Image (cartoon, rainbow, N blue to C red):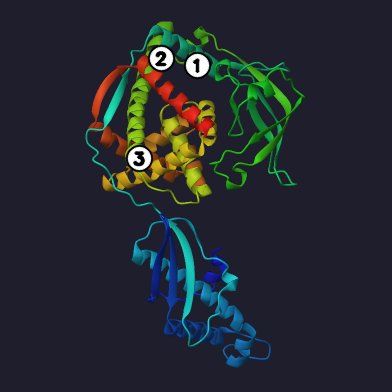
Amino acid sequence: TTPDPDAMEDFSLDDGDTFDSKVDITETGPCTRSLTITIPASVVDERLEMQLGTLVSEATLPGFRKGRVPRALLERRFGANVRQETRGQLISSSYEKALTDSELQVIGDPDFGDLEALAELESGGDFAFTVTIEIVPAFELPELEGVPVTKPIMEVTDEHIDAEILRTRYRFGTPARIEGPFEPLDRMVGSVRIMLDGMEAPFFENEQAVGVVPAVEDEGKGQFLGLMVDDLADQLGGKKVGDVVEFETLGPEMHEREEIRGKKLAVRYEIRDAERVAPLEVKEMVEQFGLDDENGLREQMRMSLETRRDSEQRNAEREQVYEWLLENIDFELPPKISEAQAAGMIEQQRMEMAHRGLDEETIEKHLAEIRGESEKSSRDRLRLMFIMSRLANDFSIEVKEEELNARIAELAASRGARPEEVRAELARSGRLRDIGMSIQHAKAADRIVDTAKVTEMPADDWNKVVDAKVAERKAAAEKS
């Protein structure tokens, strides 16, 4: 628990000055520290006297004029509250100063223990308390020049253009209401209720929950409300409007919401409506895009694919840098992975995928897969966040306003929204910082790519290498 911020705001103790406390720092783990802070009796007496003096001059009670209430009466009636609130402010002020003086970088919320169990402030005596914190891990960086990187090489072919046109036809196609039975890529909406194992009340309810039958190539897996469900095709495929679907799944061990990690989730989904998309005709697509003919459409698709290829190429190089860094930098994470850290990691992944041009549905699918990763994979992602933050700081990398605006514009385009609307939404949710960190970390990785030892490989061969690595990691995770 932490001091009550409302209580601390009732009294302004510092009035612009500071006071010195004795701070003993004990290393209780690789990333944990225990701070015992002792506030001298002279400061305790000064601050109690200040607040009691203010109370005497400002207090009004029936039968007494302002400033004329006997001090002894005020101390009997309000003394306990004054001492408690003064104590809260002293704890807050001395803790913040201890962090500043020690230059410790704290992760998450400090643990002050049970504040109610602390001794009361007493005139003439020191006041001591202990707080436990988790800090940013410390580690040594290896030599970063000449990191081995493979660059996948791919030429955009007519087959790639045909596939992209087909995807775009479905993206801009016309949805038509259907009753079922549902087929791959059919979308539905309905009311959902999720029960968390051990809880009597519903953990989550929503009247407009969207479900999508996974594509054939997804082998039955799909995301539902941000969770990867292995047999979603079996659960939704073949159903019709009015059906009630019930299934169970496990909360991922590294989900942003700590309370569902590793817990059994019982899902009840009542389907109220559904639609199937009829692909847009090529001729209509040419007109919609304001082009002269199909050749113009194909050329535009080629340019779009080449831009995406270049982005994916660079991303593949960065991913190899990330892998190399994780293999060559070893340190322990803080024992507690907070919701804020896990959520920050997820949001950075979201921003990176949007930057690569992935549509919203594909992004949500990949995020569900990330949430369902093994604990080791999730912890590696969090380790990488600390590594890249350190590198960005060492490289003195800054994010310019125009870079931030460009990334927001890309995100807005992927959503079909206006940039100013997306920026306002990100500002409200506190996610502008995540976009900035995503840009900063990518620029840090690019610094390493620029001095890497690069070899080229055909994209098809590179994809086989990547698939083999993914299969190997999956097998290791299942074995463990």
Type of the residue with mark 3:
His
Q: Considering depth in this image, is 205 or 400 the residue closer to the camera? A: 205
Q: Nearer the viewer, residue 352 or 63?
A: 352
> Height in image: 176 above or below 404?
above
Q: Amino acid at mark 1?
A: Thr
User: Given contact means CB atoms under 8 Å apart, are the residues at marks 1 and 3 in contact?
Assistant: no
- Helix, strand or loop for disc 3: helix
Front position among marks 3 and 2? 3
Q: Residue at x 27, y 19 (%)?
A: 456
The location of residue 326, given as percent across then percent down, is 36, 38
Q: Which residue is mark 3?
A: 441
Q: Earlier in the sequence, mark 1 or mark 2?
A: 1
Residue designated by label 2:
301
| Residue 11 in the image: above or below residue 273 | below
- Across and down, in percent, residue 24 comes to 39, 70
Where is residue 219 drawn, in percent x and y?
A: 58, 19
The secondary structure type at the circle numbered 2 is helix
Q: Which residue is mark 1?
A: 168
Residue 430 in view, yes or no: yes
